[in-house]
Image (cartoon, rainbow, N blue to C red):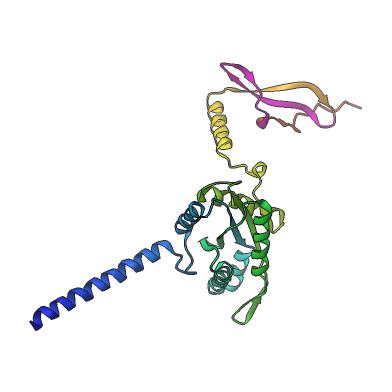
């Protein structure tokens, strides 16, 4: 009897251990090891769940820590990791109970917050987040003045699924970083990496390989800046001029008139 009880207890303990190990593996697969925040894959799933269950409106905020590489290079990876951990803690505290924060990789973080779906509400959420992050950050004996570039994409205006919203927020974030604005909402006119543009690039490459392009000079000539030329494409429909390919050539100058 005692032997049977011992075997049963051993099996129960083994099952408990296997369950714990499975839960730990699942957690590691869905969370960032440094910050403990959800990783990209888990964040996308959580945002899609929130969109499905919350009326389809809200905002994805993507943020990048400005000058992080300088901090990492000058002060070492330990300080860099401590800074990222502090950013994660601030984000977690900011969205607790109302949204989701995640670390997508490197110094890039993402936040999902419910809104009424307007750009104004999304930008207001972004401004609150920036204010929370841009307080001085004590790291060991140092005090670091933290700044972040934040891009905003709102649902359903900028996308109705997590993948699209994250991509559009990423476009807005890089616009904020390049213009040093700190905060930008997604603008379709600034999105150069659209599927349509990629298709045009592939089409142009194929046209070049087939030698379907030719240079055409315009009759207008400006003696100061040179002749105007454009690339035209031969096709079964006739010769076309792709507006996106045309450019003014400063190298096509007329020779100087002898004195």
Position of 55 with respect to 126 (left or right) is left
Where is residue 13? Give x, y as percent.
Answer: 22, 76
The part of the chain drawn in magenta is 224-244
- Which quarter of the figure has residue 133? bottom right
Tell me if residue 222 is in the magenta stretch.
no
Tell me if residue 225 is in the magenta stretch.
yes
Q: Magenta part mainly helix, strand or loop? A: strand
Going 81% across and 22% down the picture, which residue do you hit? 220
Q: Is residue 239 above or below residue 27?
A: above
- Which quarter of the figure has residue 3? bottom left
Position of 110 with respect to 36 (left or right) is right
**Quadrant of image for the N terminus:** bottom left
Position of 24 with respect to 171 (left or right) is left
- In this view, the residue in front, 82 or 46, is 46
Q: Is residue 193 above or below residue 126?
A: above
Where is residue 119? Give x, y as percent.
Answer: 66, 51
- In this view, the residue in front, 141 or 26, is 26
Where is residue 102? Give x, y as percent.
Answer: 51, 62
Going 57% across and 73% down the picture, which residue do you hit? 86
Q: How many marks?
A: 0
- Which quarter of the figure has residue 73? bottom right
Where is residue 53? Give x, y as percent.
Answer: 49, 54
**Quadrant of image for the C terminus:** top right
Going 39% across and 62% down the picture, which residue do you hit? 29
- In this view, the residue in front, 105 or 9, is 9
Q: Residue furthest right?
A: 259
């Amino acid at each position: 009897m005692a032997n049977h009880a011992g075997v049963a207890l051993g099996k129960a303990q083994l099952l408990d251990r296997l369950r714990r190990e499975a839960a730990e593996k699942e957690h590691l697969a869905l969370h960032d090891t440094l910050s403990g925040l959800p990783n990209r894959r888990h964040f996308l799933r959580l945002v899609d769940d929130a969109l499905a269950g919350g009326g389809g409106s809200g905002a994805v905020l993507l943020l990048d820590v400005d000058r992080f590489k300088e901090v990492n290079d000058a002060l070492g990876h330990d300080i860099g990791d401590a800074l990222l951990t502090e950013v994660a803690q601030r984000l977690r505290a900011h969205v607790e109970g109302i949204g989701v924060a995640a670390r997508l990789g490197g110094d890039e973080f993402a936040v999902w917050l419910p809104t009424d779906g307007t750009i104004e509400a999304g930008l207001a959420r972004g401004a609150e987040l920036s204010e929370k992050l841009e307080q001085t950050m004590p790291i060991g004996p140092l005090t670091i003045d933290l700044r972040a570039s934040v891009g905003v994409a709102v649902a359903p205006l900028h996308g109705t699924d997590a993948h699209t919203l994250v991509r559009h927020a990423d476009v807005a974030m890089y616009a904020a970083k390049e213009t040093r604005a700190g905060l930008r909402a997604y603008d379709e006119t600034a999105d150069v990496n659209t599927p349509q543009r990629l298709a045009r690039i592939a089409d142009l490459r194929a046209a070049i390989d087939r030698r379907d392009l030719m240079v055409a000079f315009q009759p207008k000539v400006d003696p100061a800046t040179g002749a105007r030329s454009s690339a035209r494409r031969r096709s079964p429909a006739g010769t076309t001029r792709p507006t996106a390919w045309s450019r003014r050539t400063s190298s096509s100058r007329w020779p100087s008139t002898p004195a």
